[in-house]
């Protein structure tokens, strides 16, 4: 499976996810406030004018939330830092919950659960880190509120405690603060972890979907074009043969010789392209054998370094763990490594650096990386580099990576790329480790 990762900052990605959630939060807040308004009106009409005068404060609070919602809605299209905007809104929500708790009895309030609601949506929107920050903020507010009420620091708070603060037992108060704080943190961790998990699953699904689409496209194109390529191959061979005979037998002037050479060179290029394409469209099954990966990669690198046309004297640093075996067709391995080295060599300047690593990882697998410090790949191109015929080179065929992808697919492996423009590129894939070398 092909995966790509651009060097986009994670905060940019988070910001994209936050935008719709924030809109929902703002809507839900208005609905909740309307509900609170309705409930307060019903409550007051039932109890008449004898109700607690503090209920009046609820109306002030409701009005404040409506005004805040209007301000948020006005700022929403202009704000670029959605994460910070969401954090400020949720922190204010947590403060409003403290006011609701205070008005409705502080320590005795039935509304402390609202802190948990705020922490849950903080984790859903701002992930684990945001959830934990809001849990800390809420705990501090709740503890300060209850301690102030309990110690009569603010006597007006004692009034809402439905009686003398002396009624409150110190141990019980501490116990309740601890329990509320622990509940807040537990909720933040659990919902934060769930949201993180959900985000990962979504990302995997998107990658999987992109891969499936690519495989479908490749299979379709492959089927169509393989037949055509086959048809081209035979006439091409006859053409080359005939021209070679003509070249030897005919008498012609030097200009004609130059033209003949061009025909031969171009038919040769066409032949390579057709062969590459046939390999991509219908890769040969190959004869898997147990290979010593260190040895096999060393040989390929040596050959590559000798091929002066391609390697351009760039030194290739190898970090290969010894004793790793894989079950693979040696020609397939050569094709994969060669194509990746070739791209790396073409991407780096004269004093560039190329590294190849093969290290054992968990699950009895080996991870292979081809790293270069070359030109890197632009963000808007990285998704298309695996498409057949996509190339940014004047002489490129755009089939190198498609072939690597195709071969790795046969070994249940996926080619991944990480790149940063101007800094370099890393291609990596994993292979299953195998038993002994013959
Ligand atoms: P080709 O090499 O013929 O262009 P490939 O399929 O091998 O075809 O590569 C497709 C494109 O991917 C290249 O044209 C290049 O733009 C990009 N690419 C591949 N490897 C690298 C690399 N190591 N560094 C920068 N760009 C790369």
Image: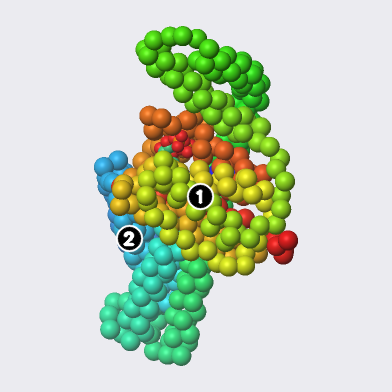
- Label 1 CB less than 8 angstroms from ligand 1: no
Q: Which residue is mark 1?
A: 303
Give percent across and percent down for residue 258. 39, 17
Compared across the picture, whether 190 is left or right of 396 comes to right
Give percent across and percent down for residue 16. 40, 46
* Residue at 45% across, 50% down: 305
Give percent across and percent down for residue 280. 60, 33
Q: Is residue 296 visible in the rendered structure shown here?
A: yes
- Label 2 CB less than 8 angstroms from ligand 1: no
Which quadrant would residue 257 be assigned to in this image? top left
Residue 373 against residue 161 in the figure, above or below: above
Q: Residues within 10 Å of mark 1 (few under 14, many from 20)?
A: few
* Residue at 46% across, 9% down: 251
What number of labels is visible? 2
Q: Quadrant of the C terminus?
A: bottom right
* Residue at 52% across, 34% down: 399
* Residue at 32% across, 60% down: 92
Compared across the picture, whether 107 is left or right of 275 comes to left
Q: Which residue is mark 2?
A: 92
Which quadrant would residue 90 be assigned to in this image? bottom left
Q: Is residue 72 visible in the rendered structure shown here?
A: no
Q: Nearer the viewer, residue 19 or 179?
A: 19
Q: Nearer the viewer, residue 114 or 248?
A: 248
Quadrant assignment for ligand 1: top left
Compared across the picture, whether 410 is left or right of 307 comes to right
Secondary structure at numbered mark 1:
helix
Q: Quadrant of the N terminus?
A: top right
């Amino acid at each position: 499976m092909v995966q790509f990762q651009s060097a986009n900052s994670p905060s940019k990605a988070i910001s994209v996810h936050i935008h719709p959630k924030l809109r929902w939060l703002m809507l839900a807040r208005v609905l909740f406030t309307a509900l609170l308004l309705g409930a307060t009106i019903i409550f007051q009409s039932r109890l008449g004018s004898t109700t607690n005068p503090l209920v009046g404060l609820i109306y002030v609070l409701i009005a404040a939330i409506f005004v805040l919602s209007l301000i948020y809605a006005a700022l929403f299209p202009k704000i670029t830092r959605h994460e910070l905007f969401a954090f400020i809104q949720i922190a204010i929500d947590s403060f409003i919950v403290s006011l609701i708790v205070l008005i409705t009895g502080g320590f005795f309030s039935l509304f402390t659960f609202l802190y948990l609601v705020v922490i849950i949506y903080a984790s859903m929107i701002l992930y684990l880190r945001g959830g934990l920050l809001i849990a800390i903020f809420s705990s501090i507010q709740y503890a300060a509120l209850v301690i102030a009420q309990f110690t009569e620091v603010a006597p007006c708070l004692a009034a809402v405690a439905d009686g003398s603060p002396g009624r409150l037992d110190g141990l019980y108060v501490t116990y309740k603060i601890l329990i509320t704080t622990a509940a807040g943190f537990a909720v933040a961790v659990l919902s934060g972890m769930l949201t993180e998990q959900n985000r990962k699953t979504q990302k995997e699904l998107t990658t999987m979907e992109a891969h499936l689409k690519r495989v479908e496209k490749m299979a379709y194109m492959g089927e169509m074009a393989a037949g055509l390529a086959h048809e081209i191959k035979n006439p091409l061979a006859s053409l080359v043969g005939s021209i070679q005979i003509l070249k030897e037998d005919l008498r012609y002037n030097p200009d004609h010789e130059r033209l003949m050479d061009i025909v031969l060179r171009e038919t040769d290029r066409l032949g390579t392209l057709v062969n590459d394409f046939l390999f991509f469209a219908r890769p040969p099954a190959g004869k898997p054998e147990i290979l010593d990966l260190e040895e096999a990669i060393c040989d390929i690198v040596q050959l590559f370094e000798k091929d002066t046309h391609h390697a351009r004297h760039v030194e290739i640093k190898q970090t290969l763990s010894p004793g790793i075996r894989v079950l693979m067709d040696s020609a397939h391995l050569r094709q994969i490594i060669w194509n990746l080295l070739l791209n790396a060599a073409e991407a780096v300047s004269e004093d560039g650096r190329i590294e190849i690593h093969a290290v054992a990882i968990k699950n009895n697998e080996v991870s292979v990386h081809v790293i270069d410090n070359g030109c890197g790949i632009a963000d808007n191109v990285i998704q298309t580099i695996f498409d057949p015929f996509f190339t940014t080179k004047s002489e490129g065929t755009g089939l190198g990576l498609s072939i690597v992808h195709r071969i790795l697919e046969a070994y249940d492996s996926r080619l991944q790329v990480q790149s940063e423009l101007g800094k370099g590129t890393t291609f990596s894939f994993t292979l299953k480790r195998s038993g002994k070398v013959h």
